[in-house]
């Protein structure tokens, strides 16, 4: 059973998938930082210095009187629509970046397909037939 599991776990597809997941998680952290640390402050500044992370609706008396979203969550039921806005923007950015990556890959693939492939070198039989043809032309 151990050998069978080892054979399964070390197959190329499983390893490729694991590498893709690890790179995806790292890429997600980069995009999350891009959104939270660079884009959202700019959007907040354009919107009049507002911070989306503290946009919430308190569903209880205590949570509606809290100053920050974190405090409101601790105080009771809270709808954090500011966090949702940030996550939605994060998703749009990730989707757009992936679109650009796939688009670039498709262009490279199309260029490779469009480039004419060099004809394969003639086989030994074709070389012999060519010599025979040339000898017959020279005789006749």
Image: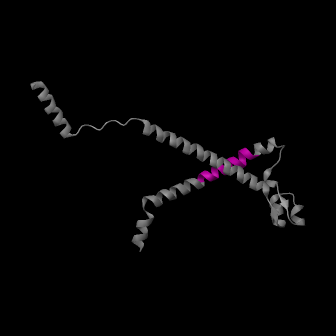
> Where 59 sits versus 37, above or below?
below
Q: Residue at x 48, y 56 (%)?
A: 16
Between 14 and 131, the residue placed more toward the observer is 131
Q: Is residue 59 part of the magenta span, yes or no?
A: no
Query: In this image, 125 relative to 7: left or right?
Result: left
Q: Nearer the viewer, residue 94 or 132?
A: 132
Apparent side of residue 79 relative to residue 112 in the rendered image (left or right): right
Q: Position of residue 69 (x, y in %)?
A: 81, 58
View extreme (bottom): residue = 1
- Tell me how the rendering is colored: one colour
**Residue 99 rendering spot, x and y as whole percentages:** 59, 45
Q: Is residue 46 left or right of residue 36?
A: right
Which stretch did the figure color magenta?
Answer: 26-40
The N terminus - image quarter: bottom left
Q: Which residue sits at x=71%, y=54%?
A: 87
> Please, what is the dominant secondary structure of the magenta stretch?
helix
Count of numbered circles on the image: 0
Q: Residue at coordinates 72% horizontally, 44% vertically from top-left?
A: 39
- Quadrant including the C terminus: top left
The verdict on residue 33 being magenta is yes
140, 121: nearer the viewer: 140
Q: Quadrant of residue 60?
A: bottom right
Up-down relation of residue 126 to residue 72 (above or below): above
Q: Could you say where residue 121 lies in the image, as x and y percent from the top left?
A: 26, 37
- 122 on left or right of 114: left
Q: Residue furthest left?
A: 139
Residue 101 picture location, percent across and down: 56, 44
């Amino acid at each position: 059973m151990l050998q069978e599991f080892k054979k399964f776990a070390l197959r190329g597809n499983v390893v490729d998938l694991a590498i893709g997941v690890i790179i995806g998680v790292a890429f997600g952290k980069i995009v999350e930082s891009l959104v939270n640390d660079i884009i959202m402050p700019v959007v907040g500044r354009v919107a009049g210095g507002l911070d989306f992370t503290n946009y919430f609706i308190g569903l209880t008396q205590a949570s509606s009187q809290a100053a920050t979203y974190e405090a409101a969550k601790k105080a009771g039921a809270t709808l954090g629509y500011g966090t949702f806005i940030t996550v939605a923007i994060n998703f749009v950015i990730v989707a757009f970046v992936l679109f650009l990556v796939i688009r670039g890959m498709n262009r490279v693939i199309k260029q490779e397909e469009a480039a004419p492939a060099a004809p394969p070198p003639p086989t030994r039989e074709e070389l012999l037939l060519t010599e025979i043809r040339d000898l017959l032309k020279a005789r006749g």
